[in-house]
Amino acid sequence: MLLKLILFSGFAGITVFIGGILANYFNHHVNENYVKYEIIHTLMSFGSGIMLSALALVLIPKGMEQLELLPIVISFLLGALLFMIIDQYLANKGGKTATLLAMLMDFIPESIALGAVFAIEPEMAVLLAVFIGLQNLPEAFNSFRDLIQSGFTVNKTLLMFFFLSFFGIIGALIGHYLLSDSPDLTAHLMIFASGGILYLLIQNIIPESKLEKNYLTSLGAILGFLVGIIGDKII
């Protein structure tokens, strides 16, 4: 059981490092042109679709099964408000680290929820691990490019992404050992994360994924959500 949890949470986290490697290759081997920007924006759109599917198919439904209406409303709004405060703080500071921190803001609570859910519903935890891994990939891709533009070296950024990829395992173990016997607290965490993720999607990710005079990039979000539907149906 523990080995499976480590493997699934490891997959959810290793895509952070893989996203960085892909972004590094993309930067050095793909010429600057319109097609390159189409690919970048489509990846962002795909990631937003995956995040929406995680909210709609796993996090919110499982939280609503466990909690009454008022606790749901409070946790959801707290998540949105906290992420908004952090987002405003990052915007005032400036720089290009916002996308990296945005990735961690949803990666960490989702990983903790993954560990807690794994003890109760292993199949649902597997689906959540797939969602986390797939959404981390485009987020890490864009975070890498932002950090390089901010002056970080390639080696330093990849090393940082390598260590960040283990956050999934750490968070899952914390959730497994501390929250698996607390379904209400796990549900609160899921709803809280949902509010924060939805704020990030509407405020930052979806607007930035739009490319002027291009309508095909929006299909990335549709495909991302479709992946979630397929995964939910299979599991």
Image (tube, rainbow, N blue to C red):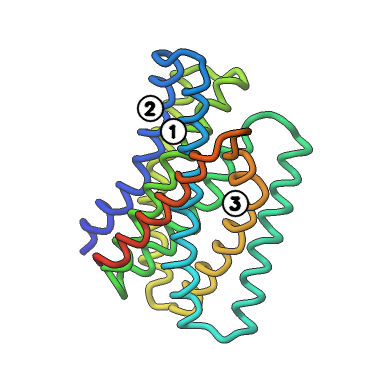
Q: Say whether marks 2 and 1 touch (CB < 8 Å).
A: no
Q: In this view, does 102 lie to the left or right of 31?
A: right
Query: Residue 5: image x %, image y %?
Result: 27, 58
Mark 2 or 1, nearer chain start: 2
The residue beneath circle 3 is 201
Where disc 2 sits, the SS reads helix
| Quarter of the image where the N terminus is located | bottom left
The residue beneath circle 1 is 161
Q: Mark number for residue 15?
A: none
**Amino acid at the residue labelled 2:** Leu
How busy is the neighbourhood of tag 3: few (under 14 within 10 Å), some, or many (20 plus)?
some
Q: Which of marks 2 and 1 is in front?
A: 2
Mark 1 or 3, nearer chain start: 1
Query: From what the image shows, is residue 171 above or below residue 43?
Result: below
In-front residue for pair 52/162: 52
Q: In this view, does 3 lie to the left or right of 49?
A: left
Dividing the picture into quadrants, the one containing residue 235 is: bottom left
Q: Which of marks 1 and 3 is in front?
A: 3
Q: Distance between the residues labelled 2 and 1?
A: 12 Å
Query: From what the image shows, is residue 205 above or below residue 140?
Result: below
**Amino acid at the residue labelled 1:** Phe
**Amino acid at the residue labelled 3:** Leu
Dividing the picture into quadrants, the one containing residue 195 is: bottom right
Where disc 1 sits, the SS reads helix
Q: Mark number for residue 22?
A: 2
Tell which residue pokes out farthest to the bottom in this image: 68
Residue at 61% x, 80% y is 71
In-front residue for pair 178/72: 72
Where disc 3 sits, the SS reads helix
Q: Distance between the residues labelled 2 and 3?
A: 23 Å
